[in-house]
Image (spheres, grey):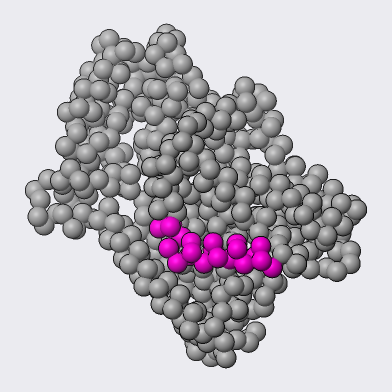
Amino acid sequence: MESLRQARLRDLTDPATSNQAYDLALIYKILIVSGIFKLLLAFSIPLTLDEAYATAVAREYSLSFFEHPPISFWMPVLAADLTGINATIVYRFPFLLAGLGITWMMFLIGREIGGSRVGVWSAVLFCAAPSPFLASGVWAVPDGPLNLASTVVVYFLVRIARFEGTAPLKLWLYAGVAMAFALASKYQAAWLPVGVLLFMLAHPVGRRWFLHPGFYLAGLIGLIGLLPVILWNAGHDWVTFRFHGDRITGGLHFGHFTGMLLVQAMYLLPTGMLVAGIGLWYGVRNRARADVFLLVFLAVGPVLIFNYINLTSTASLAHWSMPGWLLAFLLAAVWLNARGAVTVRRIWRWMVGLFAVVWLVLGLLIVQSNTGWLTRPFYERPPAWDNTISLFDFGDLKPALVKRGLWQTTDVFMANSWAYGGLLDSFMGSEKPIRIFDLSAAHHFVYLSDADALGRALFMEPSRLTDVAITDAQTLKSARSLDPNATLLPPLTLNRGGQPYVSVSVVSLTLLQTTLALQQSLSPAQ
C-alpha cells in the first residue's frame, strides 16, 4: 500500500525508477484513478443516441442485430435484467469493467513484449486517448467488448510468437475463444485473423504456425463468434451486410479524409497519434522480432483500411480505425521505452498538456449539456449555437406526459427514426411499444415483435426551442400521411438547468391495420 501511495506517473520519464514492483504499483494506481474517473463520467453523461438505441431494441434478445453483432447489445440489458434496475449506470457498468480489463491487458501485452515499464506506457497511452477511453470503457457501445476481447487475443498470440519451439496448445485455444468473443462484438475484429495470416506468410516464425494444429483449432473456435450473425442474417435477407455495403459511396473525398484525420488526432491526442505512427514504423524496422512484427500486421490493417474508406466515402466515421491505433500504442510504448530521457520528457509534457486541454473542453461540454451554465446567465432562451440536444437527459419526458394526461391514454409511441426512437423509448423505460415512421431509418426497430403495434398513438419528435415551429409542421405532415385526422398538440417543454431547452413536438393519431401498408409506400423497409 505504501508503494501504491508513492507511485507517481511522472516517474515514467525516469528510467531509474523502472522495476517490476514499482511498475505494478503504477498500473494499480492507473486502474484505480481511471476507474474512479470512468464512474464519474458514467454518472455525469446521459445516455447517448447509440446507447439508448441499443438498450431499446435489445429488450427483446436477438441472435444478432441490424448493424452490430449481439454481445454489446446484450450486455446493458442483461445487467438491467440481473439487477432489476433500469438506470444508465447499470447499463454502463459492464462496459466500465471492460475498460479496466483493456487497461490491464494493455499492461500485460506491453510487459510481454518489452518489460513492465513498456506495459505501463501502453496502459497510459490508452487511458490518455479520449475516444478509446470513453468508447472502450464508459459508454455502452461495441468498442468496449471488442477491444477487451481483441487485446486478449493479441496477448495470447504474442505469447505464442515468443515461443522458439512449439507453443502449448492451450494458448491457441485461449486465443480462439477470445477471437469468438471479438467477432461477436463488432465487425472490426475480422481484421485480426487476416493480420495473423499475413504475418504467417511474411515471417519465418509465422510460417511454422501452418504446421501447428492449434492454429486451425483456434480458427474454428473463433468462427463460432460469427454463427449468431450468420444465422440471424440468413433469416433477414442479409440486411446487415447490405447496410454496411451501402455506406461505401465511392469517389475521392479529400476534404472528408482530411477532416477524419484531424478528428482521429483529437480522439487519440495528437501526441498519441504521432507516437502510434512512429511505433508502427519502429515495428517494421524491427521485423526480426516475431512478436513486434506480428503487432504491426494486427495494427496497420484497421488504420489503413478505414482511412482509405474515409478517402472514398463520406459516410465513414473517424472512430472506425481506433482498434488499429490501440494496438499501435503497444509498439509506441516499446519505442518510447527505448528513447532517451530528454525525448521522453518532451513527449510526456506535450501529452499531459494536451490531455488537460482536451478534457477541460470535454468537461465544460458535459457540464453545459447538463446545466447550461455557460449560456443560462446571459440568454433568456438558449442561443441557436448552443446545441447539446444529443447529450440531453430526457428523464423528465414521462412525468411531463403523465402530468398532461397523455401517458395514460396512449397505446403506442412513434418517432421519425431510430435515433430519437431509441432515446425516447429508453428514457421512458421501454414500457410501451414504439414505432418508427421512416422505415428506411428504423434499423432494428422493425424486427421487434411490437413493430406494428396499433391503437392510440403519440408521434413525438424532439428539437431545440428555436426549431419547434418547423418540427411541429414536419411531424404533423408525417402523422397525417398515416391518419388524416391526426391532431397537433401543444409541445412538451423540457428544462435544462431550470431553463427551457428542448421542445418535444406531439401529434396524436390512430394507428390501424392499414397503417403499415401506408408506411411501406412512403418509406420502403430497409
Residue 311 in the figure: left or right of residue 108: left
- Is residue 261 or residue 155 the one in the foreground? 261
Question: Looking at the rendering, which quadrant does residue 234 occupy?
Answer: top right
**Left or right, 5 with reference to 413:** right
**Relative to residue 36, is residue 478 depicted above or below?**
above
Determine the residue positioned at 28% across, 44% down.
389
Q: Is residue 384 visible?
A: yes
Name the quadrant of the N terminus: bottom right
x, y (%) of residue 410?
A: 33, 25
- Which residue is pictured at 27% across the width and 10% down the height? 484
The part of the chain drawn in magenta is: 265-286
Magenta-drawn stretch contains 274: yes
Above-or-below relation of 261 to 130? above
Tag count: 0
Is residue 101 in view? no
Prevailing secondary structure class for the magenta stretch in the rendered image: helix
Q: Would residue 342 be found to the left or right of residue 377 on screen?
A: right
Nearer-the-camera pick, 206 or 282: 282
Q: Nearer the viewer, residue 133 or 59?
A: 133
Residue at 46 percent of width and 60 percent of height = 268
Q: Position of residue 327 (x, y in %)?
A: 60, 60
Residue 154 x/y as whole percent: 69, 59
Note whether 415 is above or below 33 in the view shown: above
- Report x, y in % for residue 305: 58, 45
State the residue at coordinates (35%, 64%). Answer: 359
- Residue 438 vertical placement versus 97 (above, below): above
The answer to whether residue 216 is magenta is no
